[in-house]
């Protein structure tokens, strides 16, 4: 057969093969992530690689729609290869899971496709591992997905990394009530997304914004750090939307301390995302010497409603190949082990003790789901039965521990706890 472009390349540009060594490494990374997701009570879902174009376009913004691979089936329907998985999961929740007990914790491992220029860390086909916590609002739910992102990256073997979190409401609030065209708003957003501050300055000069607004938008990329960034953001906020966004990050950062991951997390009020469905907290994970994030995500309370079902949600996604590149630089490989399954709940006062217990149980390799809605004990027992979780630990306002086990879900005394092996040791002085 004569040599040609196709016989030399054999596969389309932007796609690649995984030979045995890389395939094994990729599977090890995915297994480490999936095992961690499952330990936090998340269940796997698998969506089709090909969906109706109109369905995907409901969730994805115009920039991503332009990058979709489109095709037609024999019946004339316009189809597309999924460019991400959050929108298909939104469809599933709205059509298949809306009558299930909430919140739903879902995770996925999937390949996605975007027709864009191939570059380091991003091909036209690439692999993602992500989670979606749907049906829960508030800082507790956002804190869980951030803490899970930190835990998952560490479980995969990553040592040196950080997570940046922002709040889209802060920047949106700064531009409220300002006479800007849609094109100018997009241009400002694009300059902030690319961290192109020269372009940002040119746009601000061209639009003729008031000096106080220019000063605030120039300051936005500098609002980075830890608690001091939140204090500064509150000082600068000139509208209720931005102030509420800054207060939200303050509550969220405090919750991360209870999860034991605050030392890995930094604040960045200048963070802008390339998808338009985010409504609150946003996050990105970074590794030194890697010029792109290894994970990204945030809160998207309006996306599922586009499929006819009002339902808040939050989540994140890890770029598997990007994580592999980072692991290669740090010489680390993941591992996994089997786990028992627990539900841990509390009222508000007992939450720090509950989170501490859950953290220690997960470190033992157990599957632990923490209630983020602070439901009363009766509601949690009903939830455990509906979800088939065999063990429930509950801390009340005095941080007193009660442990329940299926099938009857009756409270266990000290003898009953002893029958569960080393559970009493994990709970330490809390054991009844």
Image: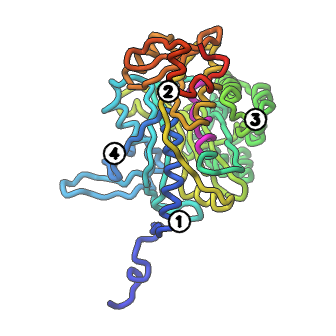
Residue 395 image offset from top left, x and y in percent:
59, 14
Quick check: marks 1 and 3 in contact, CB under 8 Å?
no
The answer to whether residue 242 is seen in the rendering is: no
The residue wearing badge 3 is: 216
Q: CA distance from mark 4 to mark 2?
A: 40 Å
In this orientation, does residue 292 appear? Answer: yes
Q: Callout 1: helix, strand or loop?
A: loop
- Compute the Cα span from label 3 to label 4: 38 Å
For label 4, the residue is 54
According to the picture, the residue beneath numbered tag 2 turns out to be 342
Q: Which residue: 43% across, 55% down? A: 111
Question: Cα distance, mark 1 to mark 3?
Answer: 36 Å
The boundaries of the magenta stretch are 140-152
Q: Secondary structure at mark 3?
A: helix
| Mark 2 element type | strand
Q: Disc 3 vs disc 4: which is toward the camera? A: 4
Which circle's residue, 1 or 3, is located before the other in the chain? Answer: 1
Q: Upstream in the sequence, badge 4 or badge 2?
A: 4
Does label 3 or label 2 sit earlier along the sequence? 3
For the residues labelled 1 and 4, the Cα–Cα distance comes to 26 Å
Which residue position is annotated with label 1? Answer: 118
Q: Main SS type for the magenta part?
A: helix
**Mark 2, residues whose alpha carbon is within 10 Å: few (<14), some, or many (≥20)?**
many
């Amino acid at each position: 057969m004569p040599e040609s472009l196709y016989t030399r390349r054999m596969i389309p540009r932007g796609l690649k093969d995984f030979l045995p060594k890389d395939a094994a490494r990729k599977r090890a990374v995915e297994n480490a992530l999936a095992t961690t997701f499952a330990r936090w009570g998340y269940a796997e879902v698998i969506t089709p690689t090909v969906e109706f174009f109109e369905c995907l376009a409901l969730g994805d913004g115009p920039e991503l729609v332009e990058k979709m691979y489109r095709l037609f089936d024999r019946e004339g329907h316009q189809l597309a290869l999924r460019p991400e998985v959050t929108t298909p999961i939104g469809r599933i929740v709205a059509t298949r899971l809306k009558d299930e007990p909430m919140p739903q914790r879902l995770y996925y491992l999937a390949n996605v496709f975007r027709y864009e220029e191939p570059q380091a860390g991003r091909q036209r086909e690439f692999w993602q591992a992500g989670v979606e916590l749907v049906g829960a609002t508030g800082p507790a739910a956002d804190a869980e997905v951030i803490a899970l992102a930190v835990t998952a990256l560490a479980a995969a073997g990553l040592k040196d990394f950080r997570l940046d979190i922002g709040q889209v409401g802060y920047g949106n609030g700064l531009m409220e009530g300002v006479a800007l065209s849609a094109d100018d708003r997009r241009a400002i957003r694009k300059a902030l997304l690319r961290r192109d501050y020269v372009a940002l300055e040119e746009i601000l000069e061209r639009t003729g914004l008031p000096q106080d607004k220019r000063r605030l938008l120039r300051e936005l990329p500098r609002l980075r750090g830890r608690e001091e960034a939140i204090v500064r953001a509150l000082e600068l906020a000139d509208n209720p939307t931005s102030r509420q966004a800054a207060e939200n990050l303050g509550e969220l950062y405090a919750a991360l301390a209870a999860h034991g991951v605050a030392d890995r997390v930094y604040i960045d009020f200048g963070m802008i995302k390339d998808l338009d469905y985010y409504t609150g907290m946003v996050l990105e994970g970074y590794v030194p010497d890697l010029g792109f994030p290894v994970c990204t995500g945030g809160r998207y309370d309006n996306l599922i409603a586009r499929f006819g079902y009002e339902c808040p949600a939050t989540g994140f996604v890890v770029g598997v190949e990007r994580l592999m590149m980072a692991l290669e630089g740090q010489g680390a490989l993941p591992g996994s082990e089997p786990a028992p399954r627990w539900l841990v709940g509390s009222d508000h006062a007992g939450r720090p003790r509950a989170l501490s217990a859950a953290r220690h149980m997960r470190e033992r390799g157990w599957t632990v789901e923490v209630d983020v809605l602070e439901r009363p004990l009766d509601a949690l027992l009903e939830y455990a039965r509906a979800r088939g979780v065999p063990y429930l630990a509950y801390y009340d306002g005095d941080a007193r521990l009660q442990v329940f086990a299926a099938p009857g879900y009756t409270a266990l005394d000290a003898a009953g706890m002893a029958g569960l092996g080393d559970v009493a040791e994990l709970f330490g002085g809390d054991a009844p």
